Amino acid sequence: MIHEELQKLEKLAVQAGKKIEALSAENQELKARLSLLEGEIQEKEQEIHHFKNKIKISNIVDNRPVSPEDATEMSDLINNYIQEIDHLITYLSE
């Protein structure tokens, strides 16, 4: 009787161990997929940001009215680009 109960417990322990291994493997796969999807989302957000900047620049070039906030943001962005270009020119000329 005790022997049978021990065998049942041992069998349950083995089953539980297998289930834990399977869940751990699934967890790792899901973490990897989550990481991949988060990276894709970040790339898409950057693309959207760049696209919005292109639209703002297009509006400025076409002399369309731009909100003061957008104009200030674009001015800062253009200044940052100019600084980056200056750094690159300095680096390349060294």
Image (spheres, helix red, strand yellow):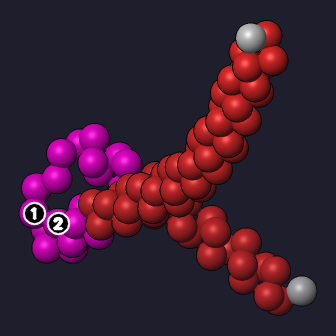
3D distance between C-alphas at marks 2 and 1:
5 Å
- Residue 6 quadrant: top right
- The residue lying toward the viewer, choosing from 27 and 86, is 27
- What residue is rendered at 13% in x and 73% in y? 62
Q: Earlier in the sequence, mark 2 or mark 1?
A: 2
Q: Is residue 70 left or right of residue 45?
A: left
**Mark sitting on residue 59:** 2
Q: Residue at x 46, y 56 (%)?
A: 37
| Residue that carries the numbered disc 1 in the rendered image | 64
Question: Are the residues at dot 2 and dot 1 in contact (C-beta closer than 8 Å)?
Answer: yes
- Quarter in which the C terminus is drawn: bottom right
Characterize the local packing of mark 1: few (<14), some (14-19) or many (20 or more) Cα atoms within 10 angstroms.
few
The boundaries of the magenta stretch are: 53-75
Please say whether residue 87 is visible from this viewpoint: yes
Q: Nearer the viewer, residue 40 or 19?
A: 19
Magenta region's main secondary structure? helix
Residue 1 occupies which quadrant of the picture?
top right
Taking the view exactly as shown, the residue that stands out farthest to the right is: 94
Residue 66 part of the magenta segment: yes
Specify whether residue 39 is in view: no
Amino acid, disc 2: Asn
Disc 2 element: helix
